[in-house]
Image (cartoon, helix red, strand yellow):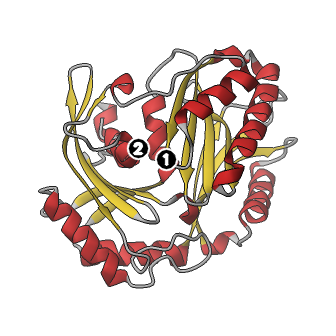
Amino acid sequence: MFDKLLKPRFPTCAVGLENDAAAVVQLERARGGYVIKRAASIDLSPDALQPSFSQSNLPDPDALATALSDLTTSAGLLRQRKWSVTLPEATTRCAILTIEGGGSRHEIEEVLQWKIERNFGAPTSELRISREQLSPNDQKQARYLVTAIHLSVLAEYESVFAALGWQAGLLLPRHVGEEQWLRQSDAGDGLLLSAHAEGFTAVLLRNNRPLTLRTVFCEIAECDDELHRVLLFYRERLGKNGNAASVSRLMVLGDRLDKNRVAEIAQETLGVSLKPLRAADVGLTIPGDLPFDSIAAPAGAARLAW
């Protein structure tokens, strides 16, 4: 009863935006998992979307609105009004912030605000911020998962959604939508590697919550070296918190990362043999030939409806 009163009801439809493409999905619950009921994707022109954390994202808002209207029409979802949205990785910033020492609630808030401004390079008055308190670290220090977007950038997207008649009740960074497919198992830690135009984001999940999170900005040729560094950091962290072998699930999404090469690097650095998960491995049925990589984020956001 209390769940019905207090838990927000998210829509079963979601749109995923990237720098050069957009995808929409309508998700259904099925026995043993989920099924994509409707879905479509479309390429975006550079005028439609140019992801950035601190600069304007939409050079021509009408171009994005037209593309999304065409996209929902092709998917048979033109009349859908309630949506969840996953935004390009470069549009938002995420970090896990640790508060050293104690203090009053007011003092902790001041320290957290200072850390947010230092990490994201902008005053909190210019940001829309969401945060989730995580379990303390080994030193019993408070930890927060913080996500931020510039208010001016958010206003651009909201104006497009309003022009379409949409009610976008939930906006998430792309990797948060994708990691939902790893937040459904108690079988060890899950590692998400999500490639995007600026590099990749790596999230290590333990007990269905982020343990570590890093976004790396690099060229394609640098991905292997950067991935080695990230996984070595994880190995050191896991050595303090358990065993690297506890990583039992690996999800690799995006064209900029070669799945087989990632599995090789994971074997070299973590000492575990991992096969990148496919849609069927996480209980998602995709009719037709639509790639899992292109819809994992919006489908994950739609999964929050249950």
Q: Is residue 142 visible?
A: no
Most distant residue in the right direction = 101
Marks 1/2 in contact by CB < 8 Å: the verdict is yes
* Residue labelled with disc 1: 254
Q: Residue at x 74, y 15 (%)?
A: 243
* Of the image marks 1 and 2, the number of the one nearer the N terminus: 1
Q: Is residue 141 visible?
A: yes
Disc 2 residue type (three-letter): Asp
Relative side of 186 to 100, left or right: left
Q: Quadrant of residue 58?
A: bottom left
252 above or below 146?
above
Relative side of 251 to 229, left or right: left
| Residue 269 position in % (x across, y down) | 75, 25
137 above or below 195?
above
54 above or below 279?
below
In the picture, the quarter occupied by the N terminus is top left
**Secondary structure beneath label 2:** helix
Please tell me how crowded label 1 is: few (under 14), some (14-19), or many (20+) other residues with Cα within 10 Å. some
* Residue labelled with disc 2: 293
